[in-house]
Amino acid sequence: MATALMMAAGTTVNAQHIWNEPGGWLGDHFTADTGGGEYAANELSLDGAITLYSDDRTVNGRVRHGQWGGGFGLNYFLDRNWGLGLDTNVSDNGGSFFDYLSFNGLYRYPLGSSRTAPYGLFGFARQFDPIGEWSGHFGGGVEFRLNQITGIFVDARYVIADKSDNFGLFRLGLRLVL
């Protein structure tokens, strides 16, 4: 086994690169910068998330239990702290493709060079499924940037619904800076 490892190590010296990435998106993706520059002004990002509605929500007299789904969103930060977001949820409930469309105001507070930024969110939404209604919401979360363009986030919001019971919505996802 030791001989095989030494022979394999000897062959890697002669290996040649057949493609050099010119320092674009892929090069930035695997490079972590700990200088605190992960959160910038004029930042556009795309979210993909796993979602969960809170348990035991009454809609039209029927109790609906917690429901899993998936969601995606788009965020734009005007400066390092203040941003706007749009997100939606898709769940397997046999109704509308989109459960809601939500508009958010965002405030994030990057914590120095830790690559972590807690954030607050507030806004309004139009829900399509299981019932058509307007709602307002507020909540918060935290994002951790693996590098300058990839982050992991978790957040929760309390939704104040127009026609059904108020409920919670939880998200866990991946954020890509475009």
Image (tube, rainbow, N blue to C red):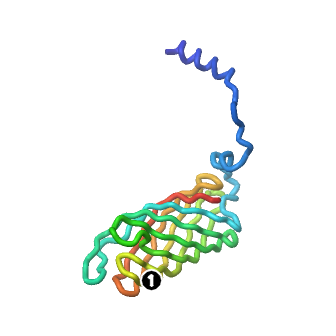
Estimate the x, y position of residue 128 in percent, counting from the top left. 41, 77
Q: Which element is circle 1 on?
A: strand
Residue at horizontal 69 percent and vertical 64 percent from the top: 40
Instruction: Identify whether 26 is placed above or below 13.
Output: below
Estimate the x, y position of residue 90 in percent, counting from the top left. 42, 66
How many labels sit on residues? 1
In the foreground, 74 or 9: 74
Residue at horizontal 39 percent and vertical 74 percent from the top: 168
Q: Which residue is mark 1?
A: 135
Quarter holding the C terminus is bottom right
Estimate the x, y position of residue 62 in percent, counting from the top left. 25, 79
Q: For label 1, count other residues whose C-alpha is less than 10 Å away and answer few (under 14), some (14-19) or many (20+).
A: some
Instruction: Identify whether 79 is placed above or below 36.
Output: below
In the foreground, 71 or 123: 71
Instruction: Identify whether 9 is placed above or below 119.
Output: above
- Horizontal side of 44 relative to 72 (left or right) equals right
- Horizontal side of 130 relative to 123 (left or right) equals left
Q: Amino acid at mark 1?
A: Ser
Residue at horizontal 70 percent and vertical 67 percent from the top: 42
Q: Quadrant of residue 57?
A: bottom left
The residue lying furthest to the right in this view is: 22
Estimate the x, y position of residue 38 in percent, counting from the top left. 66, 58
The residue lying furthest to the top in this view is: 3
Residue at horizontal 39 percent and vertical 82 percent from the top: 132
